[in-house]
Image (cartoon, rainbow, N blue to C red):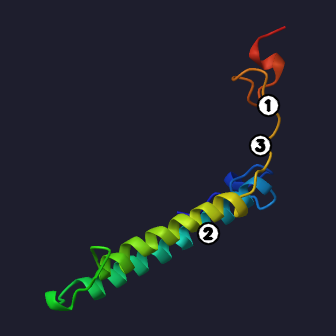
């Protein structure tokens, strides 16, 4: 079915690249997804490689935790926590959301269309 080109026109359309709030949200979403993907790939890959089909005698312990758990789960969790803190404090930007409405139902409705004098 062909796309209707009239649905994505105008300055407030979802595909508009001119909106700084939308650009910022997209950039932040891409960074978060990339960090999540990197953490998942590393965690699953490392844990599968060094945690399965391994003789019990070869497992060493770090502070009472098996080495593959420390390097495959605890370390990436810690790195992800530090990355999330950095992301929230230094990468995310605060964009103005626009003028505040006087009443909650004042969203782009002209005063005469609400039936008020």
Residue on which the image places disc 3? 97
Residue on which the image places disc 2? 31
Query: For the residue carrying disc 3, how many other residues have a C-alpha within 10 Å: few (<14), some (14-19), or many (20+)?
Result: few
Q: Residue at left 76%, top 49%?
A: 12
| Residue 47, above or below 97 | below
Residue 7 in the image, given as x and y percentages of width and height: 67, 52
| Residue placed most toward the observer, 11 or 95 | 95
| Residue 102, above or below 69 | above
Residue 112 in the image, given as x and y percentages of width and height: 83, 17
Compare marks 2 and 1 and give the one earlier in the sequence.
2
| CA distance separating discs 2 and 1 | 30 Å
| CA distance separating discs 3 and 1 | 8 Å
Q: Residue at left 79%, top 22%?
A: 102
Residue 34 in the image, given as x and y percentages of width and height: 55, 73
Tell me the element at label 3. Answer: loop
Relative side of 35 to 72, left or right: right
Identify the mark at residue 100; answer none if there is no mark. Answer: 1
Tell me the element at label 1. Answer: loop
Check whether the beta carbons of the residues at disc 2 and disc 3 lie within 8 A of each other.
no
Residue 88 falls in image quadrant = bottom right
Is residue 74 something one can see in this rendering? yes
Q: Residue at left 81%, top 59%?
A: 18
Query: For the residue carrying disc 2, how many other residues have a C-alpha within 10 Å: few (<14), some (14-19), or many (20+)?
Result: some
Compare marks 2 and 3 and give the one earlier in the sequence.
2
């Amino acid at each position: 079915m062909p796309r209707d080109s009239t649905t994505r026109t105008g300055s407030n359309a979802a595909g508009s690249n001119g909106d700084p709030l939308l650009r910022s949200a997209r950039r932040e979403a891409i960074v978060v997804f990339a960090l999540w993907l990197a953490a998942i790939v590393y965690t699953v890959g490392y844990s599968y490689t060094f945690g399965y089909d391994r003789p019990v005698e070869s497992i060493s312990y770090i502070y009472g935790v098996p080495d593959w758990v420390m390097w495959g789960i605890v370390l990436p969790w810690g790195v992800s926590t530090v990355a999330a803190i950095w992301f929230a404090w230094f990468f995310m930007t605060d964009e103005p959301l626009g003028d505040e409405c006087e009443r909650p139902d004042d969203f782009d409705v002209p005063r005469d269309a609400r039936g008020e004098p």
